[in-house]
Image: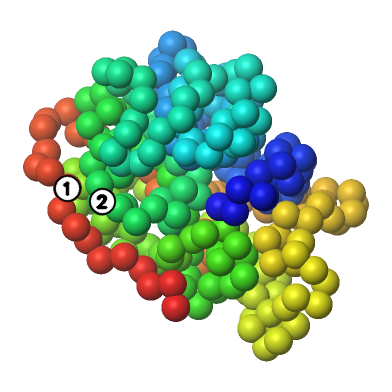
């Protein structure tokens, strides 16, 4: 992500409807896992730490980011062991193994997807969980993706193939953010027709905080998906969510898998 956006993200992500709703959905899925109370949890690509209050309630939290300014914001929360690291080749925390890895909208930033998933697989305890979210549908590509340095958007079959090829057992995979899909898809198409840039940089990165009443309404709509996501598979949405498990038996090394196009 553009480093200049981290202060803005730190300012809005606790209350912004999109971040708050994603946390509610992720939290609901984690609740169903039955983690031990002393679970070791890793968040790679933690950004400014918006997920920390939710994840720290579930166990001992460790977090990684590559950007120094993001690390500063994340450390100021005082809820996690935060260290600088680079995926997949430079992961901190020694030989620590984890019960759960949570990676929200990170994989799409990385050049070496397979290497990252292989590295995370190696750091999970047998039977440990991987929970990740990614942006979906290549045709939704927009200025938001460019500003946030996304490499790609995914479809469900491509994501399943990639994660399965890395030795994980995919237990759940679904699109989500489907209730607001028509609104968001319409806005992205409007940008493509030439309406973008008329209202400045906030329109491009989608980090503008809407008026309180609109923010509350959007949050109620989006976060209500938590009652369905995880229990049913949704055939469309702005994003994808995947839950996978590292099997008890040793699996073969990850092999390369096709990635979604950004175009």
Proximity of marks 2 and 1: CB atoms separated by less than 8 Å: yes
Q: Which residue is mark 1?
A: 254
Quadrant assignment, res 90:
top left
Residue at the (43%, 65%) spot, across then down = 152
Label 2 neighbour load within 10 Å: few <14, some 14-19, many 20+ = many
Camera sees residue 18: yes
Q: Quadrant of the C terminus?
A: bottom left
117 left or right, relative to 10? left
Q: Residue at x 70, y 75 (%)?
A: 187
The one nearer the camera, 262 or 18, is 262
Q: Is residue 59 above or below residue 2?
A: above
- The residue under the point 76% across, 61% down is 202
In the picture, the disc for residue 237 is none
SS class, disc 2: helix
Quarter assignment of residue 127: top left
**236 vs 202, nearest the viewer:** 202
Residue visible at 57% across and 58% down in the picture: 148
The location of residue 25, given as percent across then percent down, is: 58, 42
Judge whether 99 appears above or below 131 on screen. above
Instruction: Note whether 87 is above or below 263 in the view shown.
Output: above
In the image, taking residue 72 as reference, residue 13 lies left or right, namely right
Residue picked out by circle 2: 114
């Amino acid at each position: 992500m553009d480093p200049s956006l981290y202060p803005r993200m730190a300012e809005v992500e606790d209350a912004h409807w999109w971040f708050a709703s994603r946390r509610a959905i992720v939290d609901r899925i984690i609740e169903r896992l039955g983690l031990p109370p002393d679970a070791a949890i890793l968040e790679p690509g933690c950004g400014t730490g918006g997920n920390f209050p939710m994840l720290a309630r579930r166990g001992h939290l460790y977090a990684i980011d590559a950007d120094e300014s993001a690390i500063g914001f994340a450390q100021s929360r005082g809820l996690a062991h935060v260290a600088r690291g680079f995926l997949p080749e430079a992961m901190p925390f020694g030989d620590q193994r984890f019960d759960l890895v949570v990676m929200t909208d990170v994989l799409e930033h990385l050049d070496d997807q397979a290497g990252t998933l292989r590295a995370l697989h190696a750091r999970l305890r047998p039977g440990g969980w991987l929970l990740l979210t990614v942006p979906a549908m290549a045709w939704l590509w927009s200025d938001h993706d460019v500003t946030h340095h996304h490499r790609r958007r995914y479809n469900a079959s491509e994501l399943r193939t990639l994660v399965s090829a890395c030795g994980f057992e995919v237990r759940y995979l679904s699109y989500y953010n489907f209730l607001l899909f028509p609104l968001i898809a319409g806005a992205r198409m409007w940008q493509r027709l030439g309406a973008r840039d008329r209202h400045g940089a906030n329109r491009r990165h989608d980090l503008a905080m809407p008026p309180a009443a609109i923010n509350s309404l959007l949050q109620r709509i989006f976060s209500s998906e938590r009652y369905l996501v995880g229990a049913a598979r949704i055939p469309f949405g702005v994003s994808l969510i995947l839950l996978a498990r590292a099997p008890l038996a040793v699996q073969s090394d990850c092999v390369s898998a096709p990635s979604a196009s950004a175009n």
